[in-house]
Amino acid sequence: MSRCALCDELQKGKHVAYIGKHSFILVNLRLLKPGHVLVLPKRHLEAFDELTEEEAKEIFDVVEKCSHAINKVYSHYPIIVVNPKTKRSESHIHIHLVPTDYGARDYIAKIENLPYNEEAPSEIREIVREEIAKAMEEG
Ligand SMILES: [Zn+2]
């Protein structure tokens, strides 16, 4: 018995575009546009730090190869998005690839109505650096 809808999709295989040793490519159920796929581990994992090194390497290799495949078919490289756990529709970790002419900055700036190409003041960047460095140390 499968643990989630994404595990079910792997078992059914109908919408699976590629199967590797540890990972697979699934055409997304809620397709934003043709070429929107997910790259994900075969194992039902709910956090990226649960991946073995071998699984993680394969997943990044598959993301890279799939990006080229998407560009070959749809003439655009994909934006690559990983949702935080709280925003995932399925707990099974996955990486979205969506072919587009835009980059992550374009989308985030538009969605959050942020200035697109303004250079951040050095003081702001320093505050962010300190906050992230502290949080990383705390684990
Ligand atoms: Zn699963």
Image: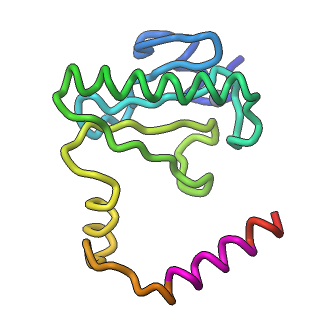
Q: The C terminus is located in which quarter?
A: bottom right
Q: Is residue 13 above or below residue 105?
A: above
Q: Is residue 134 above or below residue 4?
A: below
Q: The N terminus is located in which quarter?
A: top right
Rendering coords of residue 16 (x, y %): 44, 15
Q: Is residue 83 left or right of residue 117?
A: right
Q: Which residues are magenta?
A: 125-134
Q: Is residue 11 above or below residue 129?
A: above
**The stretch drawn in magenta includes residue 132:** yes
Q: Is residue 125 left or right of residue 85?
A: left
Rendering coords of residue 67 (x, y %): 35, 28
Rendering coords of residue 115 (x, y %): 27, 78
Q: Residue at x 51, y 89 (%)?
A: 123
**The stretch drawn in magenta includes residue 127:** yes
Count of marks placed on residues: 0
Q: Residue at x 28, y 40 (%)?
A: 32
Q: Nearer the viewer, residue 123 or 111?
A: 123
Furthest-front residue in view?
122
Q: Main secondary structure of the magenta part?
A: helix
The answer to which quarter of the image holds residue 5 is top right
Q: Is residue 67 left or right of residue 135?
A: left
Q: Is residue 31 above or below residue 41?
A: below
Q: Residue at x 70, y 43 (%)?
A: 47
Rendering coords of residue 54 (x, y %): 71, 22
Q: Is residue 139 left or right of residue 7?
A: right
Furthest-right residue in view?
138
The answer to which quarter of the image holds residue 7 is top right
Question: Ligand 1 is found in which quarter of the picture?
Answer: top right
Colouring style: rainbow
Q: Nearer the viewer, residue 95 or 3?
A: 95
Q: Residue at x 28, y 25 (%)?
A: 70
